[in-house]
Amino acid sequence: KISIFWFRRDLRFIDNTGLYYALSERNPVLPIFIFDRNILDKLPKADARVEFIQRTLEQLNKPLKDKNSGIKTFYTTPIEAFKELSKTYTLEAVYTNRDYEPYALERDREIENFLKEQGVSFFTFKDHVIYEKEEIVSGSGSFYKVFTPYSKSWKEKYKANPPETKPSALYFDNWVPLKEEKVHSLEAMGFRHTDITIPSNTVDEEIIKHYSEKRDIPALDATSRLGIHLRFGTISIRQLAEKALNLNETFLNELIWRDFYAMILANNPRVIDQAFKPEYDRIPWRQDEEGFEKWCQGKTGYPIVDAGMRQLNQTGYMHNRVRMIVASFLTKHLLIDWRWGETYFAEKLLDFDLASNNGGWQWAAGTGTDAQPYFRVFNPQSQTEKFDPQLEYIKKWVPEYGTDAYPAPIVDHKLARQRAIDTYKQALAN
Ligand code: FAD
C-alpha cells in the first residue's frame, strides 16, 4: 500500500505541511503533480507561469532521483489522473494542502468522493495561508470586513502562538521507488518557452528592512518580488512571516492583506464575479472596447497609467502603487467594469492570485470590502508628482513620452472624475 502526496500550489520540500504529514506515516509516499487540462486548455500556449511550474518540478525531481524516486506528473484532468493511479497502485491515502479557490474546492470534492468509493482517505492541510477563513473572527463571531481590526486580531494571535514550521521532506526516505521518472515537458503539452524572467525566491533582507520608506516608489526595485513564489509555494508563508515580524512591520502587513483577501474569498465565493457590496452591481459600466484596448496597450495618454500597463505587458509584473493607479483609471476615468481589468491582469501577472487580484480590483473600483470610497478618484498627475517625481519610471516604460509620438489623453481628467462620481452616486441612490 502506498500514499500519495498531491503537489498543487506548494512546490517545495521545506516546510510543506501536507507532505511532511504524508511522510510521517508508515506507507511509502508517491508525490504527484497534475498539469490540469481544465486549466491549461484555456491558457495561451506561451505562458511563463506554466513554464515556471514545469521548471520547478524538474528541480524538485532531482533530489528525489537520488532516493530512487521522483514526482509522477500527469497531463490530464485530476479525476482521470486519480482513476489511473487507483488502477496502478493500492492506495491507502491521499495527502494534499488546501486551496480555497472555488474551482479548487469543487475539484477536491470530486476527488474526495471518488477516493471514498475506493475506501481511500483524503487528508487536507492548511499550508497556503497563516490563518484560514474561520480562524480570525470578530467579537460577534463573524468574519471581518475591514482590514485594520482584522490585522490587529491576526497579529495578536500570531504573536501569542506563531505557527511552527516543518523540517524538509528530504530528511525522509520512505518514497515510492520510481525508475527514470521524467516531468512532462512543455512541448509535450503544446506549450512554448517564453523569454520572461522570473525573479528569484531568495528573500532580500535589505529590501525588507527598508520596505516602509521605499515600497511606494515604482522606479526603485524596493519590493520583494516574491508574489509568484507565494502563489506557487516556492517559498513558505510561515518562514516569510517569521522574517517579516523581525524585520519590518509594514511588510508583515502586506502578508496579512494576502491572508485577508484569501479569507474574504473563502467566506464569499460569489465575489469572483459579483461586487462584494451588491448595490455596486447596479453601476452602468461603459461598454467601451476601444478605451479598454488602449488601456491594455498602455496608450491612454496618461503616462503613469501607460508605463504601468507596458511594464505588465513586457515583464508580467507591475508595481503595486501603479496597479492601484491603473485600476482606478479603468474603473473610474473610463467607467469600465472592474471584471474586464481583473481578467486582463489574471492573464498577464506572474503573481496572479485569484483572491488578491479580485480583492485589489474590487478595492480600486470601490465595490469591495474595506474599499476605496467611490468618490475618491486617483489623480494620475498628482500620483506621479508624489511617487515618480523625476519621471524615472515613466521614462523607462514610455520612452516616447514628451515627443509627438506620444498620444493625447483619451479622456479629460476633470470631466472623467465628475462623470465617475455622478454615475456611482446615481447608481447607489436607486
Ligand atoms: P511586496 O510588496 O514585496 O509584498 C510581499 C507580498 O505580500 C506580495 O508578494 C503579496 O503576496 C503580498 N501582498 C502585498 N501587497 C498585497 C495586497 N495589496 N494584497 C494582497 N497581498 C499583498 N497580488 C498578488 O499576489 N496577486 C495578484 O493577482 C494581485 N493583483 C492585484 C491587483 C490590483 C488591482 C492591485 C491594486 C493589487 C494586486 N495585488 C496582487 C497586490 C500587490 O500589488 C502585489 O502583491 C505586489 O505588487 C506584488 O509585488 P511584490 O511581490 O514585490 O510584493
Image (cartoon, rainbow, N blue to C red):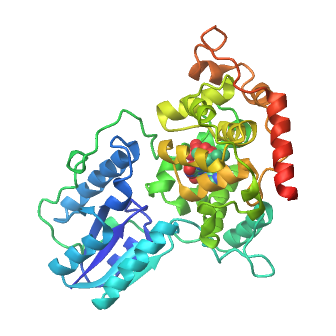
Q: What residue appears at the point 72 percent right and 19 percent down from the top-left corner? A: 390
Answer above or below: position of 170 versus 50.
Answer: below
The one nearer the camera, 114 or 382, is 114
- Residue 5, located in which quarter of the rendered image? bottom left
Residue 164, percent from left and from top: 54, 71
In the displayed structure, 301 sits above or below 317; it is: above
Depth check, front residue: 36 or 243: 36
**Picture layout, residue 341 above or below residue 7:** above
Residue extending farthest top = 404
| Number of numbered tags placed on the structure image | 0
Quarter of the figure that contains the C terminus: bottom right
Residue at (60% x, 69% y) in the render: 269
In the picture, residue 403 is in which quadrant?
A: top right
Please tell me which residue lies in front, 178 or 309.
309
Residue located farthest toward the left when viewing the structure as drawn: 179
Asked if residue 98 can be seen in this view, the reply is no
Residue 138, percent across and down? Answer: 78, 76
Residue 239: x and y in percent read 53, 60
Relative placement, left or right, of 133 versus 164 is right
Q: Is residue 426 visible?
A: yes
Q: Residue at x 34, y 36 (%)?
A: 194
